[in-house]
Amino acid sequence: MTSAATEVLLSGELVVIGRVMSASNATLLAEVDGTRVAYKPVSGERPLWDFPDGTLAGREVASHLVSRAAGWDIVPPTVLRDGPHGIGSVQLWCEPDPGQAAVDLLPAGRVPDDVAHVLDGLDGRERPVALVHERTAELRRMSLFDVIVNNADRKGGHVLAMGDGRRLGIDHGLTFHCEDKLRTVLWGWAGEELTEDEIAVLSRLEVAFQGALGEELLEHLQTEEIEATIRRCRSLGERGRFPFPSDRWPAIPWPPF
């Protein structure tokens, strides 16, 4: 099933106009019939020791599909298609509001009460700082979404604060691993009870993964990865709480931004 937005991304001519130099994998700024997009060709993916080669673009698309099925639309429209540098993910480019920051670094000791204080550290000039994030419904949904898709790389820079109040997530190549790998800066709800609506979404997704959504995801993920996602949804719903950071692997991505 495709939306009008994904149809545009799939059907138009893809023209590369630049490159995002800060990205660890090849991320190209492109246009599809005048619509600006991020194009990540499989040929530009760096090999990783814990994720199969050539699978990151598909995981980007799978994350969009799950976000859409949940009714949250956290991930901008994303498709897998051919382009000037071969098959890759193509995602609608969304420009955040430069005046907003959903995740931020503040001077240590100056953290307001209305934000979540995740950790303390030192900035590039050795000054004490605190990593914080807002406590909004939009960011809470993203935090729960990351647990579902087992996001191993939710950096602060991967959260886009849009001018209309939406909070969008990008860079979902490190998701859906069979092993628990949750690494995120969004720990502000750790241990908090899930709402009835959140548990209902988990139940709905568990069913969807075993039906049409699961069939669609098989184009991008292995069967065992989908099965692991089903188990995560079920376990999370049964516990009824956001997880705490694990002491078995790093809980914060590096760098955090």
Image: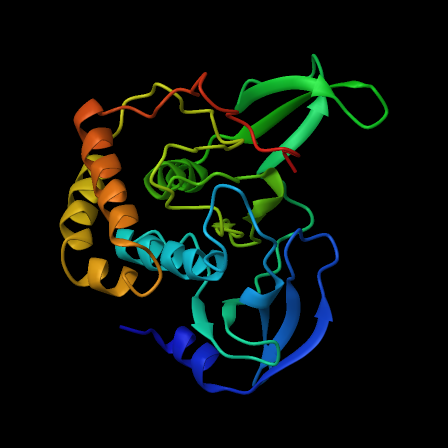
Q: Residue at x 37, y 58 (%)?
A: 62
**In the figure, residue 41 lies in which quadrant?**
bottom right
Q: Position of residue 256 (x, y in %)?
A: 63, 33
Q: Residue at x 63, y 33 (%)?
A: 254
Count of labels shown? 0
Q: Is residue 200 visible?
A: yes
**In the figure, residue 101 lies in which quadrant?**
top right
Q: Position of residue 201 (x, y in %)?
A: 22, 44
Q: Is residue 13 above or below residue 24?
A: below
Q: Is residue 85 above or below residue 178?
A: below
Q: Is residue 114 above or below residue 104?
A: above
Q: Position of residue 174 (x, y in %)?
A: 48, 46
Please state which of residues 47 and 154 is positioned toward the viewer in this rendering: 47
Please state which of residues 200 and 55 is positioned toward the viewer in this rendering: 55
| Colouring style | rainbow
Residue at the far right: name it: 125
Q: Is residue 82 above or below residue 194?
A: below
Q: Position of residue 240 (x, y in %)?
A: 22, 25
Q: Is residue 41 visible?
A: no
- Quadrant in the picture for the C terminus: top right
- Quadrant in the picture for the N terminus: bottom left
